[in-house]
Image (tube, rainbow, N blue to C red):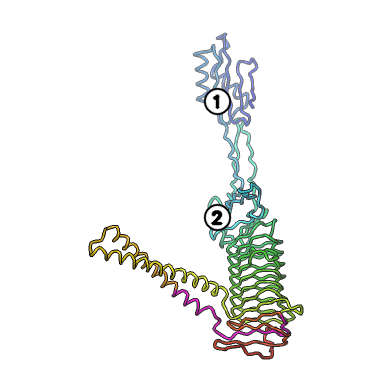
Amino acid sequence: MQSKADSGEHRMEIEFDEARLHATLIIRSIKNLSELPSETDLFNFINEKKIGFGLDVTAVKKLALAISENPGIEHRELIATGHPPELPVHESIEFFVEEPPPVVIDESTGQADYRKVMRYLIVENGTLLARKIHARKGTEGIDVYGNIIDVPLPKKEDLATGENVNVIEKEDYTEYRSSVKGIFYKRIHQISVSPVLKIDGDAGMETGNIEYDGDVSIQGNIEFGTEVHVGGNLIVGGRIESGHIFVQGNLIVRNGINTRQEGNIRVGGKLEAHYIENSNLTTLGDVIVQSSIITSNVVCCSHVILGRSSKIAGGQIYVYGSLIADVIGNPAGVKTIIQLGVHPLKYKSHKAKAEELKRKEEELGALSSTLKFAHDDIKRYRGNPPEEKKKKLSELLEKYKKNQSIVHKLKEQTALLLKEIYYPDEITLSAAKMVYPGTEIHLRRFTEVIKAPQSVCTWRYKSGMNAPSIEAFKESREK
């Protein structure tokens, strides 16, 4: 926007910009030379308009000279320039942790898979989380009239820090960096990083699948079909309904586990739960259950310990070490298999290696026959065989040596696994109250099918025994 100040005779006028920081003197064309304004007239006119700041005297004199030399045209000249204000720098915050995509489209169906939505953000130790630009005050300006041009105060931005955030002050800004690897949380005016992924409610459609290489705490349930992969420990405040659970550390379930026989829960440490029903589990550590294991397949590479008033009924329990429960089986005679003393995973690996060794030995035997035939064929040429036959024999010999080396390694691996299959110390199977018919007990190579109820008993088995000893149960569980 421009404003103008005219002379009384409308031969001269002054044009301003909106902020009145620039004043331009305009002289219209003059036909009558008697009306030609002098330099003094120009300065008087400027003084009348009270333009007193930033006046360019040289520009006014230049304009007066130009008018005298060429009065017949319009003349314009910037005659005054004010001092512009310097605006303040407001505090501003920039975040550097990228938000995940809101939804994942399954390419095969073209539909959104909401369980694959990543609703949490993982940051590494030292990750730049945010940067706050420091506020800087502005400076006042002065217009061509000498009036002060005010500037606003700089605006502030609040950003508080929670746990595991380092605040690094610089000259013009503040950096916020994570001090641990963990989950980045951003609330309205606060940022924090937690090494534990915390889910306040259920893990399911609301959270999507969970994959995190640290510890995870879920306050609610893990819903059916939800995949959870945890590199540390997992604590579940409710129950587990999904069989797609992988935990490298310990798994603690405040309620119970019932996956409806879906999938296989795998735990690298110990497992604690109130109950286990209709589920498949594999653990490297102890299985500690307060109430019951019902119609489930449990593979445990350590010990299985059930609390008082507990029971095991239906399914199969494979335990490397010992097992204790109050009741095993049920009055209806449901088939319940208990196998102890054999490492279930190493037994499986040994079986696979033994089968592979058998195949390789058969291949080596067949190759040996082929090699003998080729060698005999070479002899027929009395020291001058064709090159192609020599080449074929060389290739067969190389292949035989390679397979021979493989067979040797497989024999070593199979022998080592065989030594590690059986539990080295005493194995005990304890039923504090009752073992019902329908229960099968396997202690290494010993097998017993329970035909009649047996109460308050413990089976003990050591390496070298033909059969276990049976004695009255004595309570040894921690209170």
Secondary structure state at the residue bearing disc 1: strand
**Residue 149 horizontal/vertical position (percent):** 63, 36
Q: Is residue 274 left or right of residue 95?
A: right
Q: Is residue 370 left or right of residue 165?
A: left
- Counting every numbered tag in the picture gives 2
Residue found at the far front of this picture: 380
Q: Amino acid at mark 1?
A: Ile
Q: Quadrant of the image for the C terminus?
A: bottom right
In the image, is residue 466 above or below residue 35?
below
Is-magenta flag for residue 297? no
Is-magenta flag for residue 428? yes
Q: Which residue is mark 2?
A: 128
Q: Which residue is mark 1?
A: 79
Which residue appears at 26% of the width and 58% of the height? 386
Within 10 Å of disc 2 (Cα), the crowding (few <14, some 14-19, many 20+) is some
Can residue 362 be spotted in the picture?
Answer: yes
Residue 144: image tag: none
Q: Quadrant of the image for the N terminus?
A: top right
Closer to the chain start, of discs 2 and 1, is 1
**Residue 374 horizontal/vertical position (percent):** 32, 64
**Residue 301 horizontal/vertical position (percent):** 59, 76
Which residue appears at 64% of the width and 73% of the height? 298
Quarter of the view holding residue 360:
bottom left
The span picked out in magenta is 411-437
Q: Amino acid at mark 2?
A: Leu
Can residue 397 be spotted in the picture?
Answer: no
The residue closer to the viewer here, 89 or 99, is 99
